[in-house]
Image (cartoon, helix red, strand yellow):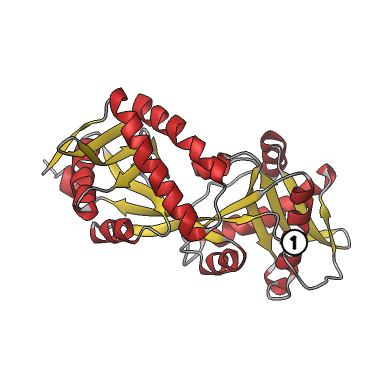
Amino acid sequence: MLTLQRARPRDLPACARLAERAFEAERARSGALPPSARAGVAPLLEDLLARGAFYAAWEGEALAGYLAFLPPFAGAFGRCQGVFSPLGASVFAGSAPDRTFDALWARAAQDLTARGVTSFAVARFAHEEAAQRALVLNGFGARCCDLMRCAQAPLHAPAQDLDLRLAAPAELAGIAALEAALDAHLGRCPVFLFKPPAPPQRFARDVERDGLAVFAAFDGARPVAYLSVGGGGETFVDGAPLTRHIHGAYCLPALRGTGLMDALLAHALDCVRAEGTLWLGVDCETLNPPAYRYWRKHFTPYCLSYVRRVDERAIAPAQ
């Protein structure tokens, strides 16, 4: 029988042990995760306990699992309040992992909907079939995928007549038009990912702020494809030492299928490898089929994020 309660500071070591086992299981299955990323679990759990909603499930004296969400935020895939449970913020174990999730989800949803939350996102390791099944049967659908590859492994691509290089600051204004085209693509069917309009100079500001390296393919002076690389990402795995992350990529439709993006990615890998990078990550929307297919050619999925939107009418009936 499960006992549910709010997690306490003394529960964190047990939660960390479950999370580290889950990480090692995914690393064994995917073969594409940096071992040093394991150290990111404990700080993540401490942060979640300090400022999030954190629930633990026990079977007798043994921790059967936990589920934690970051604080609510506005505009979560719609005009609503949402919460996000990042990778490492949940583990469903015990004698019946599906029942552990069912119980934790019901408790968290009851508390959070009472606070006006109607959008829930939960990130799980990509090869956890039992957890994925439990999420889907509770009304969640996949939306985002995080992937990784060893940067030391070379990528072979066809030669290109175009100029592939690191873009200079003065060339970022032209590349901003490619990012705007990417945003427009994401906003159309079938993705429907809303991004507010941004001034052209935003791209250059973001590059400077985040310390991004922007690699581009030029046809003469005109950029026709780009790929930006920097630190960080959306999971604790991306924060591991000697790990970099792709923050954006786009190729003009007329040049897709020519091997240009493969060549640009190979060039970027050569550059970050020379700087000592060991791992390169990327994330994409699973509901953007071309991107999801492309990144899986060269990277290994290790995380899937699932989303459920609760019907507001069920939790706030008309008076």
How many numbered circles does the render carry? 1
Residue 285 or residue 89, whichever sits in front: 89
42 horizontally vs 231: left or right: left
274 horizontally vs 21: left or right: right
Q: In which quarter of the image is residue 59?
A: top left
Q: Is disc 1 surrounded by few (<14), some (14 to 19) or many (20+) residues within 10 Å?
A: some
Residue lying at the far right of the rendered structure: 220
Q: In which quarter of the image is residue 200?
A: top right
Q: Quadrant of the C terminus?
A: top left
- Viewer can see residue 34: yes
Residue 254 screen position, x and y as percent: 71, 73
* Residue plotted at (27% across, 48% down): 93
Residue 251 screen position, x and y as percent: 69, 64
Q: Name the residue under label 1.
A: 266
Q: Quadrant of the N terminus?
A: top left
Residue 56 or residue 70, whichever sits in front: 56
67 horizontally vs 198: left or right: left
Residue 187 screen position, x and y as percent: 51, 58
Whether 295 is drawn above or below 62: the answer is: below
* Residue plotted at (32% across, 37% down): 68
* Residue plotted at (45% across, 49% down): 24
Q: Quadrant of residue 230?
A: top right
Residue lying at the far bottom of the rendered structure: 257
Helix, strand or loop at disc 1? helix
What's under tag 1, amino acid-wise? Ala
